[in-house]
């Protein structure tokens, strides 16, 4: 259970509880849920969302949670940052984020459930199973609502990829790809660039290049499924190891894609955070070859 306390000053004296909650980023759904089970208290006594506050009051918000995900502490995933409201993991490759029929107890969610057995798993960003790197998870409803719903709080991610070939020869040291992406007909997984697809925009910079490989940092302006993989395959520079989109698997048996950093405003404290995840060993080996 997360407990948040607010001391009422002149700004909210004479205003309703729900007005203060909205100001601090609580969504309508959260405010509605707080009406039950004595989860709103003022000076230690129950208070309603429509009641008025006075200067000097102490408003306490209790956020309860639950989970039914199987805990698995043996996974031992590196933690990059952790506090009462968010936790940031360095997800290894070959691990799914959410449980499924094929992966019901070996996912990031299973490890989170072992660490926090009474907390709902709320992943703010998602990575493909074979993509490594930063995953931000909210520990309560307020953190999730702000990080997912408020544009100012959306985490800004930077990806790193190794593509086949010297991309500088054709596109220079930086560039962008704007090409619509759609699902391949009769496929659940595969995507392709197609005129009737959704708008998709990718920016990149070349950090290191050779005749055989190029290391890029990549920013997503949009967030389509498989966007990075599809876009670089489309321009003739597929990700190393990405057999789904034409990548060479001689050097790596998964796409060479890593979410290397995230910057965000903390959903409760307002602090600016910058969090990095080191390259995994399999990508390091290829980068050292460039």
Image (spheres, rainbow, N blue to C red):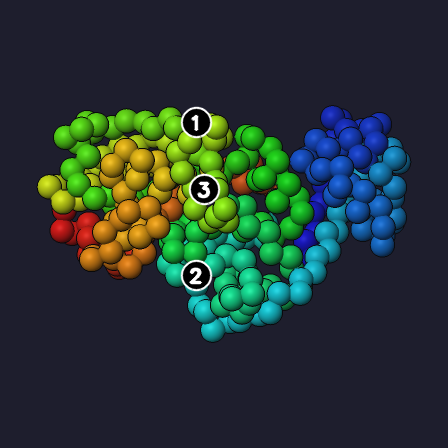
Q: Residue at x 51, y 66 (%)?
A: 103
Q: Position of residue 144 (x, y in %)?
A: 61, 45
Label 2: state its secondary structure: loop
In the rendered structure, find residue 195 and report the number of the disc placed on it: 1
Question: Which sits in the foreground, 217 or 137?
Answer: 217
Q: Residues within 10 Å of mark 1 (few under 14, many from 20)?
A: few
Q: Is residue 14 left or right of residue 130?
A: right
Disc nearer the start of the sequence (3/1): 3
Specify the farthest residue to the front.
186
Give the Cα separation between the discs numbered 2 and 1: 33 Å
Disc nearer the start of the sequence (2/1): 2
Given contact means CB atoms under 8 Å apart, are the residues at marks 3 and 1 in contact?
A: no
Give the Cα separation between the discs numbered 3 and 1: 12 Å
Q: Is residue 161 left or right of residue 189?
A: left
Question: Which sits in the foreground, 33 or 222?
Answer: 222
In this rendering, the answer to whether 162 lies above or below 112 is above
Q: Is residue 111 left or right of residue 130?
A: right
Question: Which sits in the foreground, 254 or 203?
Answer: 254
Q: Position of residue 178 (x, y in %)?
A: 37, 26
Label 1: state its secondary structure: loop
The residue under label 3 is 184
Q: Disc 2 or disc 1, which is closer to the eye? A: 1
Q: Quadrant of residue 67?
A: bottom right
Can the viewer see residue 202 in this picture? yes
The residue under label 2 is 95
Q: Is residue 160 left or right of residue 18?
A: left
Give the Cα separation between the discs numbered 3 and 2: 25 Å
Q: Position of residue 25 (x, y in %)?
A: 67, 35
In the rendered structure, find residue 13 and report the number of the disc placed on it: none
The N terminus lies in quadrant = bottom right
């Amino acid at each position: 259970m997360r407990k948040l306390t607010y001391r009422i000053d002149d700004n909210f004296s004479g205003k309703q509880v729900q007005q203060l909650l909205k100001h601090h980023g609580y969504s309508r759904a959260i405010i509605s849920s707080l009406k039950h089970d004595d989860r709103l208290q003022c000076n230690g006594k129950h208070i309603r969302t429509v009641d008025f506050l006075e200067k000097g009051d102490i408003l306490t918000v209790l956020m309860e949670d639950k989970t039914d995900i199987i805990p698995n502490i043996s996974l031992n995933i590196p933690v990059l940052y952790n506090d009462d409201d968010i936790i940031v993991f360095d997800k290894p490759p070959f691990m799914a984020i959410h449980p499924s029929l094929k992966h019901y107890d070996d996912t990031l969610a299973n490890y989170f459930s072992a660490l926090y057995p009474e907390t709902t798993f709320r992943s703010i960003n998602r990575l493909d199973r074979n993509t490594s790197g930063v995953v931000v998870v909210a520990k309560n409803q307020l953190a999730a609502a702000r990080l997912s719903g408020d544009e100012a709080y959306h985490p800004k991610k930077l990806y790193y990829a190794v593509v086949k070939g010297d991309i500088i020869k054709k596109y220079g040291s930086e560039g962008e790809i704007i090409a619509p992406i759609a699902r391949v007909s009769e496929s659940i997984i595969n995507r392709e660039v197609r005129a009737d697809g959704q708008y998709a925009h990718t920016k990149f910079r070349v950090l290191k290049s050779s005749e055989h490989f190029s290391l890029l940092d990549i920013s997503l302006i949009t967030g389509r499924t498989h966007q990075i993989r599809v876009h670089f395959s489309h321009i003739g520079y597929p990700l190393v190891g990405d057999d789904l989109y034409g990548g060479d698997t001689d050097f790596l048996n998964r796409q060479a894609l890593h979410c290397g950093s995230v910057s965000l405003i903390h959903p409760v404290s307002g602090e600016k955070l910058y969090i990095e995840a080191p390259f995994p060993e399999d990508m390091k080996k290829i980068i050292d070859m460039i």
